[in-house]
């Protein structure tokens, strides 16, 4: 497995040198064995949403293609998902994060569930985090636990990179597994033939968008179609 000097996370997924990291290899094994149902569910859900995510991220020259696999971790590409902590939508934004990204919420809508606006917000947020930390490992860790908490951890542990923070137990439990889970899932998805992974057979759908002048009940709309 090749490894270029200074190879950043997304590049190491692209050339598979991420597999030199034991924690990434462990999660590859988990995804291809006991967690294959989660990967299959994510790929099934992705048929609706991934083309838009790829198009949106593709318009941002600074965002690697591999990041379009991030919703696999965020509730298996399910745009209706809500976590116990209150994170919502395809990108699992917490309420305060959504407000900070100008995703509005009112009795009629929560824009964290708006596929177009939330995906644009996710692209902008990830770009901001990478510019701030100059590292996709730190950017993704901050995406998971919040940039405020990440700032405090970095300040309290000067000179440590993400992997050193993991090794020394300095990160919240979920965040300490987040980057390696993402790298493993993306390695498999981006190189499915190499890993012998064949996802579920399904037809991809094109998403159509409609603008309504007035609020419309989804139930009434589905019954009239």
Image (cartoon, grey):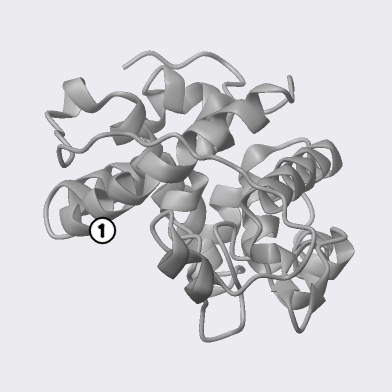
| Neighbour tally class for label 1: few under 14, some 14-19, many 20 plus, Cα within 10 Å | some
Q: Among all residues in the image, which is located at the extreme front?
A: 224
Q: Give the tally of numbered discs.
A: 1
Residue at horizontal 78%, vertical 35%?
Answer: 134
**Above or below 200: residue 157:** below
Q: In this view, does 73 lie to the left or right of 128?
A: left
**Above or below 65: residue 121:** below
> Does the rendering let one see residue 217?
yes
Q: Is residue 78 left or right of residue 43?
A: right
Q: In which quarter of the image is residue 92?
A: bottom right
Residue at horizontal 62%, vertical 51%?
Answer: 115
Q: 26 or 61, which lies in front?
A: 61
Residue 204 location, x and y as percent? Answer: 32, 34
Residue at horizontal 75%, vertical 63%?
Answer: 150
Secondary element under disc 1, as helix, strand or loop, is helix
**Above or below 139: residue 75:** below
**Mark 1 highlights which residue?**
38
Residue 141 location, x and y as percent? Answer: 63, 56
Residue 182 location, x and y as percent? Answer: 45, 47
**Above or below 150: residue 96:** below
Q: Where, quadrant-wise, is the N terminus in this rendering?
A: top left
Q: Where, quadrant-wise, is the C terminus in this rendering?
A: bottom left
Residue 17 location, x and y as percent? Answer: 39, 23
> Does the rendering let one see residue 168?
no
Residue at horizontal 28%, vertical 42%?
Answer: 25
């Amino acid at each position: 497995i090749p490894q270029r000097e200074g190879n950043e996370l997304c590049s190491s997924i692209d050339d598979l040198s991420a597999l030199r990291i034991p924690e990434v290899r462990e999660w590859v094994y988990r995804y291809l064995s006991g967690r294959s149902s989660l990967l299959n569910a994510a790929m099934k859900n992705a048929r609706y949403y991934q083309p838009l995510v790829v198009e949106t991220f593709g318009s941002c020259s600074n965002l690697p293609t591999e990041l379009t696999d991030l919703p696999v971790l965020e509730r298996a590409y399910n745009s209706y998902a809500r976590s116990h902590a209150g994170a919502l939508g395809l990108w699992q934004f917490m309420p305060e994060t959504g407000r900070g990204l100008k995703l509005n919420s009112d009795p009629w809508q929560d824009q964290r569930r708006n596929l177009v606006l939330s995906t644009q917000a996710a692209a902008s947020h990830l770009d901001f985090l990478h510019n701030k930390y100059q590292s996709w490992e730190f950017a993704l860790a901050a995406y998971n636990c919040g940039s405020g908490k990440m700032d405090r951890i970095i300040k309290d542990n000067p000179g440590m990179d993400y992997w050193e923070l993991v090794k020394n137990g300095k990160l919240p439990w979920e965040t300490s597994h987040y980057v390696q889970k993402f790298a493993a899932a993306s390695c498999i998805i981006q190189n499915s033939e190499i890993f012998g992974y064949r996802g579920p057979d399904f037809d991809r759908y094109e998403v159509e968008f409609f603008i309504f002048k007035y609020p419309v009940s989804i139930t009434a709309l589905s019954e009239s179609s």
